[in-house]
Image: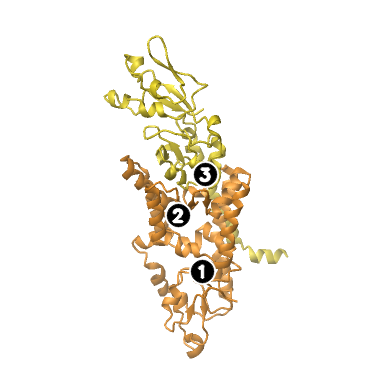
Amino acid sequence: MAGFLALALAGAFWHSGIGAFSGFGIWSVAAICPLGFLETVLAARSVVPWLLVPFLAMVIMTALYGRVFCGWVCPVPLVRSWLPGSNASPAGKNGNHDVRLGNGTETADHESRAWPALSVLAGTLVSASVFGFPVFCLVCPIGLTLATGFAAVHLVRTGQPSFDLMVFPAIVIIELAVLKKWCSRLCPLGALLSLFSLPQRGLVPTVDRTRCLVETKGSRCHECRKGCEFDIDLKKPPFEGGINECNKCRVCADNCPAKAISFPWWKG
Amino acid sequence: MGKRLKELIGRRSLLQAVTATGLLLGLGGIASWTSRRSAADPYLVRPPGGQDEARFTSLCIKCNRCTEICPEDVIVNAGVRDGPLVARTPRLDFSLGYCDFCMDCIVVCPTAALLPIRKSEAKLGIAVIMKDRCIPWQWGGCTRCYEKCPEKAIILDEFKRPIVVADKCNGCGLCKLVCPTDQLRSYKPGQTRGIEIERT
């Protein structure tokens, strides 16, 4: 994450034209933020045909490898880790997490947990089409994090200070400090990528049932789920524990006392 | 069927969807309401290909790529003072550079918010002499913009005062870049130079 952020900022400094993550690329070859693309389609009420190529590339990548962007490129988890009280997300959960073994009710819980983010996604698309410009982009923490960096680059290059350097980070900090579960509960881009990643086959966290303590020793270990930001239960039958939301952060694999979790490149 | 649908989309999630949509609609409303003055700012000049303002704002995803690639450093990101709707979108700051129509910005634009155009048909804006600041219109002596204009769009009247030929001007901004009012008349407050580029 820090690497991608540094690359974007260095690019801004040296005329590279790499850009923010909404349109990362070199010359005419660029990735595109799939949410931003849908917003512009609805806002302009027209599709630029060749933009379907990077958009579909993003869709296919996510369909194969899931929300890799969220765990490895997006700067939001990094920024949140700089904010005070950020350790609360995994550790704070330990206190009130109800350790239940799978009993069916949690699947229903999980479906309802996805709704807020899907709601924000719906709101993003509706507002873009109503007002004719990408409304969510105004408050997108990814865009504002990058914009803060770009404002800093502008200050260094031209010596012109601006309010942007205070306003943009302030919005990001307010969003991430107040809405602590941004990534798992509210982010519309995350919700969109979760939909695309339903058929994912690569980098799916897989429990080796011959090593898992729950299976082998009948213990009530739930270390993998405790650390997971998305509260994914890996021991549920495949794809029922909301595994499409997994951002490949590998916290579960690191937490597992039996080292039973792996992220194979391809799961048949 | 109705019951299943109700189970799938419970009352709570429907409420969440309505709330989220409402909040974002409110945000969009506030943004466009507070930005209506700045969006009409006559000095908000866009990079080449972005002259249709409504089309441009609906497509720009604020990726910073045109700003970065510009070899003349004339493209800057608009700030929050330009209004929430305009903030982070590219604008041309002719006190930093001018447009040489290399069209690199159009090449890197990932959403075609900047439409490909030919240099001959490009018209970013139009130069306007600020007669209360322009040195020759006040006293005389300066002919910098007349000398530098690559389009020969500035002519001199009988008192050697510059006049813009609107048809020839393509809004490249070199006249403003070389205009010395901000140094020679720096005692007069304000950032306006003796010649400014207005959006057409």
Q: Residue at x 37, y 64 (%)?
A: A86
**Residues behind callouts 3 and 1 on a single chain:** no
Task: Indicate the position of residue B194 as horizontal and vertical percent values.
Answer: 37, 22
Q: Amino acid type of disc 2?
A: Ile
Residue ID at (73%, 65%): B1
Q: Which residue is mark 3?
A: B107
**Residue assigned mark 1:** A246
Say left or right for A159 vs A105. Answer: left
Return the residue at label 2.
Answer: A142
Question: Circle 3 sits in a helix, a strand or a loop, which is it?
Answer: helix
Q: Colour of chain A?
A: orange
Q: Viewed as shown, does residue A112 lie left or right of B139?
A: right
Mark 2 belongs to chain: A
Tell which of A63 and A265 is nearer to you. Answer: A265
Q: Amino acid at mark 3?
A: Val
CB of mark 2 within 8 Å of CB of mark 3? no
Check disc 1 and report its element: helix, strand or loop.
Answer: loop
User: Which residue is painted at 40% across and 51% down in the image?
Assistant: A11
The numbered mark, 1 or 2, whose residue comes first in the sequence reads: 2
The image shows residue B61 at horizontal and vertical percentages of 51, 47
B75 to B154, vertically: above or below: below
Chain at numbered mark 3: B
Question: Which shade is chain B?
Answer: yellow
